[in-house]
Amino acid sequence: MTPTQQRRFFTSESVTEGHPDKVCDQIADAILDNILDKDPKGRVACEVVVTTGLVMVMGEITTSCYVDIPKIVRHTIADIGYNNHNCGFDAATCGVINTVKEQSPDIACGVDTGGAGDQGMMFGYACNETPELMPLPISLAHQLSRKLAEVRKNGTLSYLRPDAKTQVTVEYDKDQRPFRVDTVLISTQHKEGASQEQIAMDLKKHVISSVIPEHLIDPKTRFYTNPTGIFVIGGPEADSGLTGRKIIVDTYGGYSRHGGGSFSGKDPTKVDRSAAYAARHAAKNIVAARLADRCELQLAYAIGVADPLSIFIDTFGTHQIAMDEIYRKVYQCFNFQPKAIIDYFGLCRPIYRKVAAYGHFGRNDLELPWEKTDKVEELKNA
């Protein structure tokens, strides 16, 4: 169906925890969590690469504690589901290369005094399309991916393997409100010998029907399952993976702008991570307070400087009060200095591995501090 002046289509994708890039993100954040558990002041900038039979960990880490990086790598891979050679990648037999070195003291000079860990700009976004105040396409795509992992791990569909991708296209009306799902695409790794007909039927029954609300499906909704006809070889055996290569999956599915910085493997002094969480928190509270139906908030920083260089707010014409008033409320209710963000959310603790797959925002399955709407009344009364 082609778009018209009254209707538009928007598509977002998600990937499961077994996708090669997501394997890297989870390893990096598992290392971060292990360090923060023992040394909350640890400085971590960890990158991971995976390919057939090999994991390489690199980056800069400064900490007072010891962590067994190869052990963390293997435990994370096994937990994802790559725990035997039949999956093409095995936690017990893959090689692990550790090239981590100490972080530059030049960075610490500015960060130890409360400044930002790097320069850059970060975006946060919220809208009233879903109860979790996220865009509907990425919300549905993530739910499909999580459901795929659930039915694989609990044995409902035991022939599934860890690597999979989902994609959802939503149709919007002339008022930019979602009213139907146009296309659902699932590509999932599977055991050799599983028929595509059986896979399609099982996914429709056990995954799609439990995620996509019935009122969003109509006779024109299209469903695609493994369009190439087979997906046996997957994970790091089929494709190399790299930390930070799924930043759109991590955030808003392309519905909002992105500053370009990834999250995983970075301690909270890196504003790529902490300021993106703070921007989401502010945008979500603005929408929850009904000051606007949609809100995107940008923060910009200089390395070693505490205060943001700029704050930009865009409500896309949906604001219910004057924009000057929204700016005044935001400046009054939120402190965007890195140390203040870290303290307010309690970010120097091991909470990152669990958000390294299935998105950092809109996670009703997790108690994430930046997802709380705890500033609504303060914003209303400011």
Image: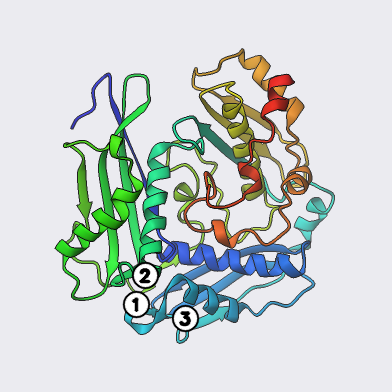
Task: Give the labeled residue for mark 1.
Answer: 87
Q: Which mark is residue 235?
A: 2
- Its colouring scheme is rainbow
Disc 1 and disc 3: Cα gap in Å? 10 Å
Residue 232 seen by the camera: yes
Compared to residue 291, the image places residue 226 above or below, namely below
Q: Earlier in the sequence, mark 1 or mark 2?
A: 1
Left or right of 61, for residue 313: left
Image coordinates of residue 246 in percent, x first then y, are 45, 54
Instruction: Indicate which disc, 2 or 3, sits on the residue closer to the N terminus.
Output: 3
The answer to which of 324 and 75 lies nearer the viewer is 75
Q: What residue occupies the far top of the structure in this picture?
A: 322
At 46% from the left and 70% from the top, the residue drawn is 80
On residue 91, the disc is 3
Number of the label disc, if any, that sits on residue 378: none
Name the image quarter holding the N terminus. top left
Question: What amino acid is found at the position of numbered circle 3 in the picture?
Answer: Ala
* Residue at 21% over, 48% down: 223
301 relative position to 145: left or right: right
**Which amino acid type is shown beneath numbered disc 1?**
Cys
Q: Quadrant of residue 191?
A: bottom left
Residue at horizontal 41 percent and vertical 43 percent from the top: 138
Gap in angstroms between the C-alphas marked 1 and 2: 8 Å
Q: Which amino acid does the dot numbered 2 rest on?
A: Gly
